[in-house]
């Protein structure tokens, strides 16, 4: 079965590549493996193994946040992002004009 890019789809091969990528510290591969274990796609459904992969990704995101000083909504009051905040009650959805109301 072709996937549109003229290559054969192979879930076992994908699992091998994702496993090596996750060992190489790829968060995308870890998330893909976590979802595959959570949904049982090509592997036995295992929520515990899925949780381990998701925890590794979460820990890496926390470490990146702390070391790089990434600005998020949670720390917006400590940065210049506050001048770009739009309150929901002040924002008008432009699509409402076209929806026939």
Image: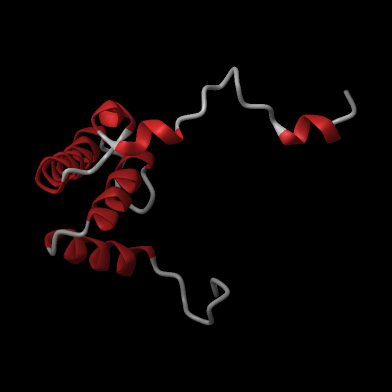
Query: Is residue 77 or residue 14 the one in the foreground?
Result: 77
Name the quarter where the C terminus is drawn: top right
* Residue that extends furthest to the right in the rendered view of this protein: 100
Query: Is residue 53 or residue 65 the one in the foreground?
Result: 65
Q: Is residue 84 left or right of residue 73?
A: right
* Residue 49, quarter of the rendered image: top left
- Residue ID at (21%, 35%): 51
Q: Position of residue 73 (x, y in %)?
A: 33, 30
* Residue 15, quarter of the rendered image: bottom left
* Residue that extends furthest to the bottom in the rendered view of this protein: 6
- Residue ID at (14%, 59%): 25
State whether residue 66 is above or below residue 42: above
Q: Position of residue 52 (x, y in %)?
A: 16, 39
* Residue 65, quarter of the rendered image: top left
Q: Position of residue 86 (x, y in %)?
A: 51, 28
- Residue ID at (40%, 69%): 10
State whether residue 6 is above or below residue 78: below
State whether residue 34 is above or below residue 86: below
Query: Is residue 52 or residue 99 the one in the foreground?
Result: 99
* Residue that extends furthest to the top in the rendered view of this protein: 89
Q: Position of residue 96 (x, y in %)?
A: 78, 29
Count of numbered labels shown in the rendering = 0
Colouring rule applied to residues:
secondary structure
Query: Is residue 82 or residue 35 the one in the foreground?
Result: 82
Q: Is residue 84 left or right of residue 80?
A: right
Name the quarter where the N terminus is drawn: bottom right
């Amino acid at each position: 079965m072709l996937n549109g890019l003229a290559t054969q789809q192979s879930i076992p091969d994908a699992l091998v590549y994702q496993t090596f990528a996750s060992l190489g510290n790829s968060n995308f591969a870890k998330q893909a493996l976590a979802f595959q274990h959570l949904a049982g796609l090509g592997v036995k459904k295992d929520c515990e193994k899925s949780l381990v992969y998701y925890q590794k990704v979460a820990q890496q995101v926390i470490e990146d946040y702390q070391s790089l000083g990434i600005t998020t909504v949670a720390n917006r009051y400590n940065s210049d992002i506050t001048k770009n905040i739009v309150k929901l009650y002040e924002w008008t959805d432009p699509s409402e004009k076209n929806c026939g109301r």
